Image (cartoon, helix red, strand yellow):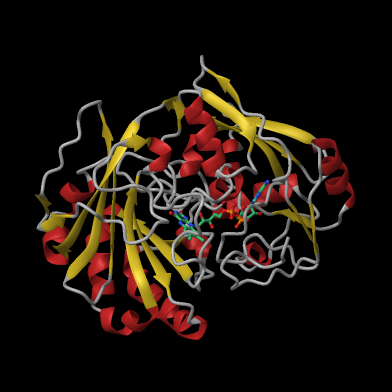
Amino acid sequence: MELVNWAGNVRYRASTVHSPGSIVEAQQLIATLPRVRAVGTRHSFSTIADSPGGALISLAGMKMDLEIDEESATASFLGAHSYGAVAAELDARGWALENMGSLPHISVVGGTATGTHGSGDQNGILATAIRAIELITADGELRTVADDDPDLEAMAVGLGAFGVITRLTLAIQPSYRVRQDVYRDASWDTVLESFDEVMASAYSVCLIGRFESQTIGVTILKSVVAPGDDDAPLERFGGTWDPDPMPGEHHTVRAGRPGPWHERLPHFRPDYPPSVGGDELQSEYFVPRRHGVAAIEALRSMGDAIEPHLWATEIRTVSADALWASPAFERDSVCIGFTWKKHPEEVAALTTDVEEALEPFEPRPHWGKLFGSTDLKRRFPRLSEHLALAERYDPTGKFGSDLLTGLG
Ligand SMILES: Cc1cc2nc3c(=O)[nH]c(=O)nc-3n(C[C@H](O)[C@H](O)[C@H](O)COP(=O)(O)OP(=O)(O)OC[C@H]3O[C@@H](n4cnc5c(N)ncnc54)[C@H](O)[C@@H]3O)c2cc1C
């Protein structure tokens, strides 16, 4: 495995990657290595997956071994597999997850560890589906933390700090079908005037566009459908329904055509490179729902400065949760994402400006994306407890990360 992340903006300072072929082999490695950190599919833009001066460990070569418990409606499997692979296996057996992020390429364990999310007023971040975690701790022991253990609320968005997760148990539900409808060029003013109504208008809603423009490029509504329910309203929120919104083969099927949940909830297909193929940097901030419109307006007023360096912004919503390191901890949230052009210096400078502009709205950054702020203990009320608990699991800092150490 190359020691660089997917977008190529982070060269890991770890010296090697271990890929053990069994849990026992992984336990032995972890017990003996002085410094090691689990890595997923390397899609994070931040240095969260790095282990400077140490080693990385990937369990992706081991079998998924997915087991379904129908009575508790849970599925347990090796978490290093991608959301796409796990979702296809679940769906083939008649089951589904509540939600997915925009790309199915990421590992389930790496996605949940950073607070990855999709959209939907009633949907939590992906880690809220976790019902149990099996992990190898610093001493090489295999432990299970289930939902009757208060530590689970810390470990679900674990930031790789507690150990190397082997299996995850997630809540599942019977399979369902979803359609995606794309509305073009709704005006920002119209949408922001009725923001709550727009974001509540489907199971999952996202706005993708540019701040300097008067209109939002595309509004995507992902709706759960019943059989036969396939009519599309031709206009919504002043936007025009697009009958052929397929500018790239890498997008999942749109145009209102119903399909399995896992082929509609992500924006990207698993068999193509996602987004702009890695020619990008990303950052994202969660603000409390009540500040969402004001925060977007603040960024619109910076639109001209942002414009030369931005591919697009994406705005989504998620519901509040109880997970200590979650950016949605105890706050229904509006998530404001930036897919930047690969202009590192300009993006770094704009990140400072964006964080300053968002400051009145109590922003919490996405752990897997770029951010400048280090004073995160103020923003994440249980982060100090999270780090203290991680230290109890890992007293010598074997799973340490410069990013987390930098938080003080
Ligand atoms: C094109 C693109 C689109 C994206 N879209 C979204 C989106 O829609 N929503 C969103 O929220 N985010 C999105 N992201 C961000 C992405 O979801 C996160 O960065 C995610 O964490 C990446 O998962 P990964 O498997 O690549 O993990 P990595 O980046 O490899 O690792 C992330 C963290 O997981 C930990 N980890 C990995 N494996 C284990 C393990 N076995 N045990 C313990 N800890 C482990 C690592 O130590 C690290 O801390 C996007 C990223 C890209 C590149």
316, above or below 147, in the image: below
Residue 168, horizontal then vertical, whole percent: 61, 35
Question: Which image quadrant shows ligand 1?
Answer: bottom right
Residue 128 spot, x, y in % from top left: 47, 38
277 over 264 or under it: above or below: below
Q: Quadrant of the N terminus?
A: bottom right
191 horizontally vs 375: left or right:
left
Q: Horizontal and vertical percent for residue 160?
A: 65, 51
Q: Which of 352 and 308 is in front in this view?
A: 308
Name the residue rendered at 51%, 16% in the picture. 70
What's the residue at 71%, 65% (across, down)?
A: 2
Instruction: Classify residue 282 as left or right of residue 198.
Output: right
Q: In the visual, does 25 lie left or right of 313?
A: right
Above or below, 111 against 214 in this view is above
- Residue 172 appears anywhere in the view: no
- Pick the quarter of the image with the C terminus: bottom right
Residue pictured at 41% horizontal, 80% vertical: 350
Q: Can residue 67 be seen in this view?
A: yes
